[in-house]
Image: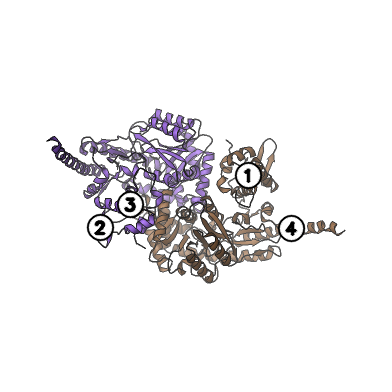
Chain colours: A brown, B purple
Amino acid sequence: MCYLLRYIGMVTISQLDVSSEIPLYRQLYDRIAESIHNGQLRNGERLPATRELAVQLGLNRTTVSAAYSLLEEDGLLKGHVGRGSFVNFSMPAADRISFASSRPAEDHFPLAEFQETCREVISAPEASAILQLGSPSGYGPLRQYLLDQARLSGEAAPDDDVLITNGCQQALDLLQRAFVSSGEGVVVEDPVYHGLKNVFIRGGARLFGVPMGENGLDLEQLGRVLIRERPKILLVTSNFQNPTGATLPLEARESVLRMAREFNVLLVENNIYGDLRYEGTPLPSIKQLDVSGGTVLLRSFSKIAFPGLRVGWVIAPRAVIARLAEAKQWCDLHTDQLSQAILLRFAVSGRLAAHASNVRTAGAARLRAVLAACEKHLPAGTQFTRPSGGMSLWVKLPDPLDASELLSRAEQEKVTYLPGRYFSVAQFDPGTLRLSFGGLPPSQIEAGLAALGKVFTNELTRVRKANRFEAAPAMV
Amino acid sequence: MCYLLRYIGMVTISQLDVSSEIPLYRQLYDRIAESIHNGQLRNGERLPATRELAVQLGLNRTTVSAAYSLLEEDGLLKGHVGRGSFVNFSMPAADRISFASSRPAEDHFPLAEFQETCREVISAPEASAILQLGSPSGYGPLRQYLLDQARLSGEAAPDDDVLITNGCQQALDLLQRAFVSSGEGVVVEDPVYHGLKNVFIRGGARLFGVPMGENGLDLEQLGRVLIRERPKILLVTSNFQNPTGATLPLEARESVLRMAREFNVLLVENNIYGDLRYEGTPLPSIKQLDVSGGTVLLRSFSKIAFPGLRVGWVIAPRAVIARLAEAKQWCDLHTDQLSQAILLRFAVSGRLAAHASNVRTAGAARLRAVLAACEKHLPAGTQFTRPSGGMSLWVKLPDPLDASELLSRAEQEKVTYLPGRYFSVAQFDPGTLRLSFGGLPPSQIEAGLAALGKVFTNELTRVRKANRFEAAPAMV
């Protein structure tokens, strides 16, 4: 067996969508390129032979060959006659600047406070109980705390309950399992976080994307999808959506709520970025606006505290929580209790609030830096969103620039990002890309965008010049 | 909405098997009784009206009524005219003795060593990296350690890789997702741990049970099932199976391996109890015997260390691990890193080995106590297994005793256990029950079995007397 099947094995048929308008070779290309960019496939590693991979994936060999050719064109693969194809890409090292990952900055982790919190938890009388088998619903004291907090803030109705999950990703997975059978519809934003998209596609859902604008999803199109498709779930990110950074205005929140009720769709509000507001006044969440109950709210400690500790939570009507908890039990019995206890203590002690405040101060500086640098360095005609918080913004390069094609050139300049195609549901604009700025200090943001700006501007100049020359003969 | 739907909501159609020989009302009864016994439904809580629950579950109302009647007969529910049905069962308190839960004893947790390990981990230079987003495959240093150990012990072939999961339960779930489509066959032991059974049933698999004897599964019947059903997965517990405590002899391990290869079925060896051997010589695991590779091995820290920290692992060929890792990514991104780092340090420091040795010493005393107490207190004609390790043994009461019916009487005597029906796949003997002794000190084992023995003996005497009287008229 080829040593590298373990990586290429990551591409399975479940991820390739035969009904998609995107051709299979392009989907395969995307998946392998993603594995290269996120480091699952490392520089110098050998890919399986096209024939081998074709058999493994049940694809035509020409499909695999076409994907490999594209990867070679991009400079991500290097072919050696008789020896095979090798990855030709080094992960960003310390001297590289990555706008590719939507995660908090490690240098801002309050390590001393975390250590102090751990010490308190492990020397408390409850330590033994934490080490023992727990409940599928979560660690009791944490559940109680989160429910109390949610009641105080008006985010939990009297009939609501809470379920602890392994981060928000598991909440999405449990929703799919408990509420969406194969062939049922799920409405999401377009573009949307790929981990959200994939969990429903893998579960056999029909996914409908509603285009995103600067002000969140397009309500007219949402209405049309709801009428036409009668979906099971409507999933909306209220604040600082990943990847666009868009925040849904107050009236739109009320409209979404009304529409969800009218079409009897389970409304899921993803609000994992809500605590990362750097400017402006916080808006009430959809869950807070929902006086009649029924909305499912997803929250997480990952974005505001420590993503390595996998603790998120769901607030929803009891009957919904019960179905999710049942699914949770067969998934993994329960969430790790030590991390639950630590995050509870981190919150109760006031350290979480203090840390969140620091994160917001740093985030505000980063947001200012990224907006100023986009303005300064990106070529004229570039459009980009102007979020008030979160970790990412969305860039549309001037036509005919292709963010995927330009990525390898950016990486030669030691800067990386994720092209828009990773996030597309139905519509796809090759000029788009996501810039995640949350993990980078302002100096690196400025330096990284200066480099990107040069790559994009050079390409634009080159293309325009070429077009002028191409146009010439026809004028003779 | 009824307050209690959150519990009754735990019963969903996915858990009721219409094709089963067990009638639906009995399945519903089982599920509710289980919720009462494991504390999800608490004493005094109101159940939904039969009509309400019937609608919720899509069942006939008479089915729900029949289940409620049975629960009332058992004394688990109390009906009040016009007010509804209320749970009538208090969870075992400190003065109760529970043979119901297969988990380690809290009083044996090496708290000081655990605290010391935590302190070392959180003050190490890697602490920041642990708090950051991790890999779906697991925390790198832990994976490397487990793979190195497995190579040393011959449990990892050169082409094998390792995946960290949230305990063994998640490994089962990932196997279902990655390898078993709806309608495909999975062969398991009968009886078998209900969490294992349910994960595959929920995933739509056709489940085939192979009867268990004192020496593990019946190889002749296994052969017949493999020929007839051509299943996708064969799942075998090599040591101290839950619930029977049975260990597969060496020759049987070799036979299973041969049969799996012959019928091209993915062989999964569940060996989460293997470290809990209290007497006799350890046998090579199936994975160790498998020189040609291909066997999937499931391991966990939960049974030997701290079940509250959710860390298990899978060792399997790279291509298998890659498919599991892909499923893992959509499930929850990755396993909690703090617990992974702590368990790694706990192992590397030698503390795990020292703790395991203590656990085995204590386990040996408990095993002796439970076997002696069964011998002494259970009525003549009772059969029970004699495991050499693990946490449970399997009891078959003399006919016509019914372990489910007698449970409420045992609970009046402040002793509880799980009746055999929770573990049955196809065959079911109402006289069977599981005694989990791993979490109880010998004195409680003795006292608990004395009480159980009295309940069973009294009932046997009563039944036999009644039968004599009933038989009398015919003799006239």
The chain holding disc 2 is: B
Q: Secondary structure at mark 4?
A: helix
- Report the Cα–Cα distance between label 3 and label 2: 17 Å
Q: Nearer the viewer, mark 1 or mark 2?
A: 2
A12 and B167: which is toward the camera: A12
Asked if A323 appears above or below B249 in the picture, the reply is below
- Report the Cα–Cα distance between label 1 and label 4: 27 Å
A385 and B148: which is toward the camera: A385
- Report the Cα–Cα distance between label 1 and label 2: 69 Å
Label 4, on which residue?
A458
Q: Amino acid at mark 2?
A: Gly
Q: Are marks 3 and 1 on the same chain?
A: no
Label 1, on which residue?
A43
Q: Nearer the viewer, mark 4 or mark 2?
A: 2
The chain holding disc 4 is: A
Q: Secondary structure at mark 2?
A: strand
Q: Secondary structure at mark 3?
A: helix
Q: Earlier in the sequence, mark 3 or mark 2?
A: 3
Label 2, on which residue?
B79
Label 2 Cα neighbours within 10 Å, binned few <14 / some 14-19 / many ≥20: some
User: Please, which residue is most extreme toward the top here?
Assistant: B251
Q: Position of residue A129 (x, y in %)?
A: 34, 52
Look at 43% across and 29% down and name the residue there: B254
Q: Are marks 4 and 2 on the same chain?
A: no
Q: Amino acid at mark 3?
A: Thr
Label 3, on which residue?
B63
